[in-house]
Amino acid sequence: MANKYSSVGVAVYLAILGCLTLAQAVTLEVKQGNSTCIKAELSALLTIPYDTVNGTNTAQVSLPNSTTVDVSASSCGADGRAPWLVGIFGAGHTLGLGFSTNGSLYSVVNLSLQYNLSDTSVFPLANSSDVVTLITSSVGILAQVNTTYRCLTATPVPVGEATVTFSGMKLEAYMPGDDLSPNESVCTADQSATTTSPPPATTAAPAPTPPGTPDRGDYAVTNGNNTVCLLARMALQLNVSYVSSSQNKTIQALFNLQPNQTSSSGSCGPTSAILVLMQEQTTNLSFTFTLNITSKRYHLSGLSLSAAWPDMATPVSASNSTLTDLPGTLGMSYMCSAEQVLEVTPAFSLNTFKLQVQPFGLSGDQFATAEECQVDQDNMLIPIIVGAALAGLVLIVLVAYLIGRKRSHAGYQTI
Ligand SMILES: *[C@@H]1O[C@H](CO)[C@@H](O)[C@H](O)[C@H]1NC(C)=O
Ligand SMILES: *[C@@H]1O[C@H](CO)[C@@H](O)[C@H](O)[C@H]1NC(C)=O
Ligand SMILES: *[C@@H]1O[C@H](CO)[C@@H](O)[C@H](O)[C@H]1NC(C)=O
Ligand SMILES: *[C@@H]1O[C@H](CO)[C@@H](O)[C@H](O)[C@H]1NC(C)=O
Ligand SMILES: *[C@@H]1O[C@H](CO)[C@@H](O)[C@H](O)[C@H]1NC(C)=O
Ligand SMILES: *[C@@H]1O[C@H](CO)[C@@H](O)[C@H](O)[C@H]1NC(C)=O
Ligand SMILES: *[C@@H]1O[C@H](CO)[C@@H](O)[C@H](O)[C@H]1NC(C)=O
Ligand SMILES: *[C@@H]1O[C@H](CO)[C@@H](O)[C@H](O)[C@H]1NC(C)=O
Ligand SMILES: *[C@@H]1O[C@H](CO)[C@@H](O)[C@H](O)[C@H]1NC(C)=O
Ligand SMILES: *[C@@H]1O[C@H](CO)[C@@H](O)[C@H](O)[C@H]1NC(C)=O
Ligand SMILES: *[C@@H]1O[C@H](CO)[C@@H](O)[C@H](O)[C@H]1NC(C)=O
Ligand SMILES: *[C@@H]1O[C@H](CO)[C@@H](O)[C@H](O)[C@H]1NC(C)=O
């Protein structure tokens, strides 16, 4: 057995790539002898719902740059097995891509995700210690032979109840040489991104926009059969601390998300829904909403940011999957017109304005009745109180006037 696999020499390069790719790009390479047959450069965010003693939690983990190729599971396909790239990280978690070709096209025929629930750093309070394997054969990665598949846009792929969101992806299988082919098969999401927005400025790349109030954008997620399953309307401002390469120190910057340069994608499951917003391949924001079936309530449970702005000395990634923000009721939308500050990590918070979201229970592509946040309700009370106070004042003045008039009238009569 060992002989069979020893011919598969495997090299792994870890790279944090330059400006136009996202944080934590991992490079994985499968080799046979001295020649490379599969090479992938990608970032991946894994969103995994799991059971705890008291309900469902959602874990969010980025493919770390300590990911290596699992030599015994990977293959170039020469030994009668299908070409297979398996990355392994942490406590035995793996992400696998299986390939096939018909001579002119190649594709990822299945995507597998294996995770170890006994890893409490990723799955706190899990009620099981099983190793779970999920697989899907609908991946949608297809390219011409002798070209590199390129998809920089964040692309969520549902795998069972979990979701793998790839971004900044370049990969090639059945490689003619050792490097990625210069010819590219560009995914449709990247094609529409370049046709609907102006060509990215190469000199003054999309650096943090000077703050002001951000513009409001409308974002939607559709599921497999093209029905809208998540709606969000909101204005977003990122508050990020990072090491500035121009100033050589840590600075705090506000960055308004520009709706007209932002694409949305995502996926919807029965108890978790994901919205991924990506602005020009340099800013990637992922929202995870979780539904508690028992209480019929949902909330924003996870938020993660990857940013690679020109002035950043190193790309920034920040995520938190134990949030309890934006609480709503199933069948209703959640609305908050007032500014809210969502604290994600000490280095990143998200300011929201004029927000309305509905991650579950949509019928049609309209928001259901809105449930207003407490701040809005309080803000609405102020004009009512002021109005009531004014009305009271007017009444008092009126009564005083009437009494006064009656008195003076009575006064005349006595004369
Ligand atoms: C791999 O390359 C080295 C030197 O570059 C060479 O000595 C060796 O024979 C090669 N092995 C194979 C299997 O081609
Ligand atoms: C689950 O229960 C534990 C204690 O039994 C508690 O610490 C934890 O906060 C609970 N988690 C949730 C999500 O309710
Ligand atoms: C874990 O909890 C879920 C529901 O919370 C339950 O359905 C499942 O049987 C539990 N699994 C174990 C191994 O206890
Ligand atoms: C779901 O809601 C029920 C009822 O409010 C609560 O007891 C339970 O802890 C919640 N589960 C989670 C995972 O929050
Ligand atoms: C799963 O994680 C536990 C604890 O981290 C570890 O002891 C175990 O070996 C892991 N299982 C696999 C299959 O890697
Ligand atoms: C490979 O598949 C594509 C699409 O299914 C088809 O258009 C093409 O003709 C096939 N090529 C060969 C060599 O069979
Ligand atoms: C791919 O490139 C190899 C080597 O350059 C060549 O032999 C092969 O015919 C090419 N295949 C296609 C479909 O272009
Ligand atoms: C994944 O696809 C490969 C290639 O078609 C196939 O050999 C393998 O059995 C598939 N794996 C599973 C688990 O379906
Ligand atoms: C679309 O799929 C969802 C489940 O995935 C189902 O509930 C819904 O009825 C389907 N809608 C249509 C129009 O087929
Ligand atoms: C940046 O600052 C550090 C200490 O604050 C200093 O050691 C380093 O030389 C500075 N680098 C540049 C390029 O100014
Ligand atoms: C995007 O919106 C901003 C502000 O509304 C505007 O200045 C800019 O020209 C717009 N860009 C495009 C490409 O529409
Ligand atoms: C995640 O958010 C929770 C609630 O806001 C906070 O208590 C926790 O410290 C945050 N975790 C990290 C890693 O910042």
Image: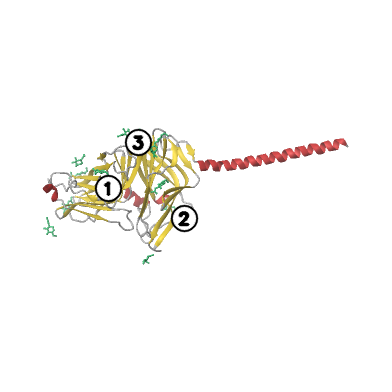
- Residue at the limit of the structure toward the top, as seen here: 294
Disc 3 marks a residue whose amino acid type is Val
* Residue 32 seen from this side: yes
Q: Which residue is mark 2?
A: 211
Q: Secondary structure at mark 3?
A: loop
Name the foreground residue: 406 vs 133. 133
| Circle nearer the viewer, 1 or 2 | 1
Disc 1 marks a residue whose amino acid type is Gly
* Residue 285 seen from this side: no
| Circle nearer the viewer, 1 or 3 | 3
Residue 55 x %, y %: 36, 36
Name the foreground residue: 348 vs 163. 348
Question: Which residue appears at 15% of the width and 44% of the height?
Answer: 81
Checking the image for residue 90, the label placed there is 1
Checking the image for residue 53, the label placed there is 3
Distance from mark 3 CB to nearest ligand 2 atom below 8 Å: yes
Residue 364 x %, y %: 41, 35
Nearer-N-terminus badge (2/3)? 3
Label 1 crowd (10 A; few <14 / some 14-19 / many >=20): some
Residue 58 x %, y %: 35, 41
Nearer-N-terminus badge (1/3)? 3
Tell me: 294 left or right of 15.
right
